[in-house]
């Protein structure tokens, strides 16, 4: 599956637009990680616990979006975007979305 944040692929032409696809996940903070993050906040630097949690959330949202595109027999997804939203105190949604398309190689 080819993915891009652009409207098209350099080496492929879009032959059919299949429609929007999305994948999301909602994650809540963990009290133990909050304590470590608070301590790290005192001395500065990267909060590794949250970096890891957000990286896992992005991957899960991407995987779910790609799964939805595969159901449509898509070859690629264009206009890929991420967005986040607060769901409740201490929990947030991460959403990946784009447009599923059928592709064919461009002729030279």
Image: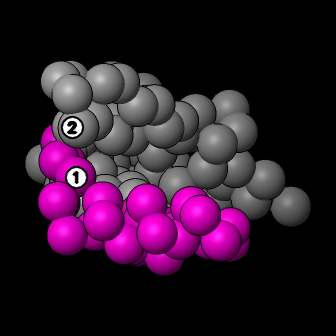
The magenta stretch spans residue 60: no
| Residue nearer the viewer, 88 or 4 | 88
* Quarter residue 44 falls in: bottom right
- From the viewer's perspective, tell me whether residue 64 is left or right of residue 75: left
Label 1 Cα neighbours within 10 Å, binned few <14 / some 14-19 / many ≥20: some
Per the image, the residue denoted by label 2 is 91
Which residues fall within the magenta stretch?
A: 26-53
Q: CA distance from mark 1 to mark 2?
A: 6 Å
Q: Is residue 13 above or below residue 48?
A: above
Q: Are marks 1 and 2 in contact (CB under 8 Å)?
A: yes
In terms of sequence position, does the residue under pointer 1 or pointer 2 come before the other? 1
In the image, residue 63 lies at what x, y percent?
26, 61
Per the image, the residue denoted by label 1 is 29
Q: Quadrant of the N terminus?
A: bottom left
| Residue nearer the viewer, 39 or 79 | 39
The residue lying at 46 percent from left, 45 percent from top is 77
């Amino acid at each position: 599956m080819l993915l891009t944040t652009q409207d098209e692929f350099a080496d492929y032409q879009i032959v059919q637009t299949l429609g929007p696809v999305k994948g999301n996940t909602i994650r809540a903070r963990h009290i133990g990680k909050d304590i470590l993050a608070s301590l790290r906040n005192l001395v500065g630097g990267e909060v590794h616990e949250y970096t890891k949690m957000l990286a896992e959330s992005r991957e899960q949202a991407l995987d779910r979006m790609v799964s939805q595109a595969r159901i449509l027999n898509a070859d690629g997804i264009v206009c890929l975007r991420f967005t986040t939203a607060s769901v409740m105190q201490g929990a947030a949604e991460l959403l990946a979305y784009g447009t599923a398309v059928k592709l064919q190689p461009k002729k030279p």
